[in-house]
Image (cartoon, rainbow, N blue to C red):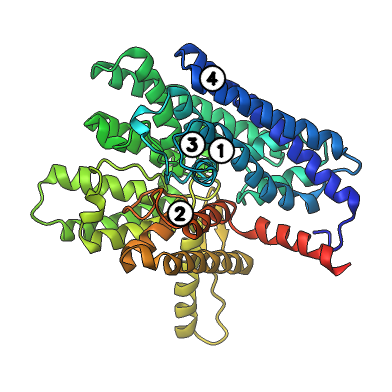
Amino acid sequence: MVISPDRKDFFAVFHIIGRLSLFLSLCMVIPLGVAFFFKESSPFYDYLIGILVTASVGFLLSIVFPLKKEVGWQHSFFIVSLGWLVASLLGAVPFFLSHHWLSFLDAWFESMSGFATTGLVLVQDLDHLAHSHNVWRHLTMFLGGQGIILATISLVRSAGSANIGLYVSEGRQEKIFPNVIATARFIWQVSFVYMILGTTALTVVLYSQGIELSKSIVHAFCLFMAAFDTGGFAPQAQNIAYYHSFSIEILTLILMILGAMNFNLHFWVWNKDKREIFKNFEVKIFLFTILIFTIVLYWAMQGNPAVRMFRKGFYQLISAHTGCGFTNLAYGELDREQPIMAAILIMAMGIGGGMCSTTGGIKLLRLGFIFKAVVGEIKKAVMPFKAIYKERYHHLKDSVIEERYIKEAFIITTFYVFTYMLGGLLGLGQGSVIHSFFESFSAAANVGLSVGITNPGMPTYLKLTYIVQMWMGRLEFLSIFIALGYVFSLFKK
């Protein structure tokens, strides 16, 4: 990090933010095309204005702040932290113009929820929202899940240090290839292949249920992006319950799990060793936690039919654990479930999915490292004084857990727990203790399940709290803290 940045450093940062804004304006052409196809006149102009505003910001920043210094590692964290805020603000413009959000703050909340792949909503009358607005809501999830930083990387003309910095600062610690550009291309390749397969399968199911073809395609496209990018938005207010379809639930369940898995694991299964899925440490942690949570849910839901236990219990568990936020429960039903179910979902949301995936939360690998560290300390305590003991694990290859991995796992976990707790305390006036912490975990872990606290009528301070939680949780704190240090350094001069 530059301890005392100069004028050229800020020029470099804002120049790249300008390029990112221009890229975002190009992405808005997609919902503009959808509005044209479905003859949605008002939304068409919403996106036309949105494109003009976003492109104008992009051109203005690019011209006013010419690139006078090569973008390096020290700029990356500030670029990503500020870039996410700018993208969410610009992405909110078409939402606000639609009048389906009561204020620009509500529209910004929805936009940040989309880009952060959270899924908490403040939209009004979602069932009558235009197709173009629904496509943009879900496209923000696709861009946020694996697109914003990868798009930024492709726009930077700098050496590898900046590319790596931009990649890491979004919360991705693992590269698939030594070259970050190659890693980015593979992530896009995986995403587009699954998009074709997932959207096709969902379209077939929806069309077979009597939904007209054009609407089936739009809904399938939206459901795929929300499921694979573990976002949780849905085209209808009832979420997955709207479809009353076991097939849709199974397909989204598969897509949620695929999205929550490490992209490195996808690479190994696709190109190297398919058996890695049975040996991988993260997968084992995921299966173990799911097993424990399922047993507790089974005990809590005794007396319910097996089908209800699967559809009303297990589905919510997978949705929470993968950080997706889909629900097939009727409106308000999650709020009425037993406290034990809410507690299980809170823990599942807090853990999250795999590293280098589209999900949020503490992450499975970090949880595994902490568990191994605790077990290792217990074993060391009972072993002879001079004995040397090292914990091993298999994640793509057999490795020894290094001290720095354990330290990083404890630090990031501490930040997440503090954020979960602080958000829960700030929301206490809006509901019961368990409901307040449920909503806080959902926001900070980028999940999107809600027990009703998140609504257009909640206080402004709580909307801003959840926006900050979604932003910090998605970027995993480090880039934001470095960016703040970058800004604070100005006052030292």
Can you say whether 50 is above or below 1 in the image? Answer: above
Residue 306 located left or right of residue 216: left
Reading the image, the residue beneath label 2 is 443
Q: Sequence-wise, which precedes: disc 4 or disc 1?
A: 4
The residue depicted at 57 percent of the width and 28 percent of the height is 189
Q: In this rendering, which labeled residue sits more in front, label 1 or label 2?
A: 1
**Residue at the farthest bottom position:** 385
Q: Sequence-wise, which precedes: disc 3 or disc 4?
A: 4
Q: Is residue 160 visible?
A: no
Reading the image, the residue beneath label 3 is 269
Q: How far apart, in angstroms, are the residues tagged by discs 3 and 4?
A: 42 Å
Q: In this rendering, which labeled residue sits more in front, label 2 or label 4?
A: 4
Q: Position of residue 192 (x, y in %)?
A: 52, 26
Mark 3 residue element:
helix
All told, the count of numbered labels is 4
Tag 4: residue type? Phe
Reading the image, the residue beneath label 4 is 44
Mark 4 residue element:
helix
Reading the image, the residue beneath label 1 is 92
